Image: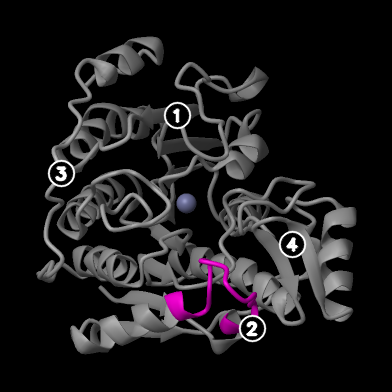
Amino acid sequence: MSVGLIYDPVFLEHVMYDCPERPDRLLAIIAHLQETGLLAHLQILPGRAASREELLSNHTPALVDMIEELAANGGGEFDGDTFVSAGSFRAAAYAAGSAISAVEAVCQSSFRQVYVLGRPPGHHATARRAMGFCLFNNVAIAARTALRQGWVKKLAIIDFDVHHGNGTANSFAEEPRVLYTSVHQWPLYPGTGDWRETGIGAGRGCTLNIPLPPHTGDAGYLRVFDELIKPALYRFAPELVLVSAGYDAHWADPLGDMLLSAAAYRELCAMISDWADTLCAGRQVYCLEGGYHLGSLASGVAATISALLGLPYRDTLGPSSLKETDIGDLPRRVARWHQLVN
Ligand SMILES: [Zn+2]
C-alpha cells in the first residue's frame, strides 16, 4: 500500500525574519527524508489551494479577508509570533487545500496514509483569530470538508503537538461527529486544554484533553496513548483519523520542556496506524504542526513516515539524558473522568 506525501515550494513563501516557524523547517525535513532513503518510498501527490468557500467552512469572512489583504499589501503582524508576509495567503490557502487533498485521497482513492508537509501550521487558529504561528486551521478545514462532502460520517483528530490545539478544540467542541484528543504540556501556551473538558452540548464525550507535566518522556507518552487515546478512539469508532503532528515535544526542541525521542514518535505513530487499520481500513492523514529544532523535527517526521511504511528508523539523536517525570495515576484519573475502559 502506498504512502503519499504532499509538499510544494509554495509553503516556503510564508516568511518572517527571526521567527522559529520558518521555511528551513521543511527544507530540513525533505533533506533528511532524502538522506535516509525514505523519500524514495513515498508517492508524491499534488496539493492545491483551498477555495474561499472551503476556508469559510471554519473561519469568519473577516479573518479570511484580513489575511488576504495583509498579504496583498506586503504583510503585517497579528501578534508577537503570528505574521503575514506577501506570500502568506498563498501558502496558508495551499496548506489548507493540501490537507483537503490528502483527506480526499485516503477517502476516495487507494491511498490509505498521506503526510502533508505544509506550513504555516494550523491548530491554534480559531474561527475568527490567527494566533500561535497559525493562520488557517488546516486540519479543521479538512475535517469540515470530509464531513460536508460525505466522505465520512465521523472522524477523530489526534493532536500530539506539545501545545494544546485550542483552535481545533474550539471548532469541534459542540460537534458529535468529531473526536478531538490532544496530548500537550501543562502549563504551556496557549493555556487551554483542561483534562476535565469533555465537549459541549451534542459534542459531549467527544473531547479528550491530556495535559502532561514538563519532562514527560517516552514512557509517559506511551502510557497515555495506550491507556487513554486507544480506548477513546475505539469507543468513538472513527472512519478517518487526522493527526496534528507537531514535534515540539522532542527533548531537543527549544519551545517545549518534554523529553520525547524520535524513536518514541515512531512507536506512537505505529500505534495510531494499527488503530486506524482496525477501525477505518487504515485511513489516516498527518498534517505537520510545530517542531522548531531542525534536527529533531526532521527526525520526528522521518520516524513517523518510517512507521507508516513499516520500515526501520535509526534515531541518531537518541533519548534524553534527563530523568523523565513519572506521571503516576494521571491516566487513571483522566480515564475515570471520561469513563474510558481499557
Ligand atoms: Zn506546538
Q: Nearer the viewer, mark 3 or mark 2?
A: 3
**Residue 83 found in image quarter:** bottom right
Q: Nearer the viewer, mark 2 or mark 1?
A: 2
Q: What's the residue at 26%, 88% (across, down)?
A: 34
Side of 52 where 274 appears, left or right: left
| Residue that label 1 marks | 209
| Amino acid type at image mark 3 | Leu
* Residue 99 percent location from the top left of the image: 55, 66
Secondary structure category for the residue under label 3: loop
| Residue that label 2 marks | 13
Return the residue nearer the eye: 75 or 307: 75
Return the residue nearer the eye: 213 or 109: 213
Crowd band around label 1 with a 10 angstrom C-alpha radius: few (<14), some (14–19), many (20+):
many
Is the residue under label 4 in contact with that under label 1 (CB below 8 Å)? no
* Residue 256 percent location from the top left of the image: 39, 47
Secondary structure category for the residue under label 4: helix
Crowd band around label 3 with a 10 angstrom C-alpha radius: few (<14), some (14–19), many (20+):
few
Q: What is the magenta segment's predominant secondary structure?
A: loop
**Does the segment drawn in magenta span residue 24?**
yes
Relative to residue 76, is residue 252 depicted above or below?
A: above
| Amino acid type at image mark 1 | Asn
Return the residue nearer the eye: 168 or 253: 253
Answer yes or no: disc 2 within 8 Å of ligand 1: no
| Residue that label 3 marks | 322
| Residue that label 4 marks | 54
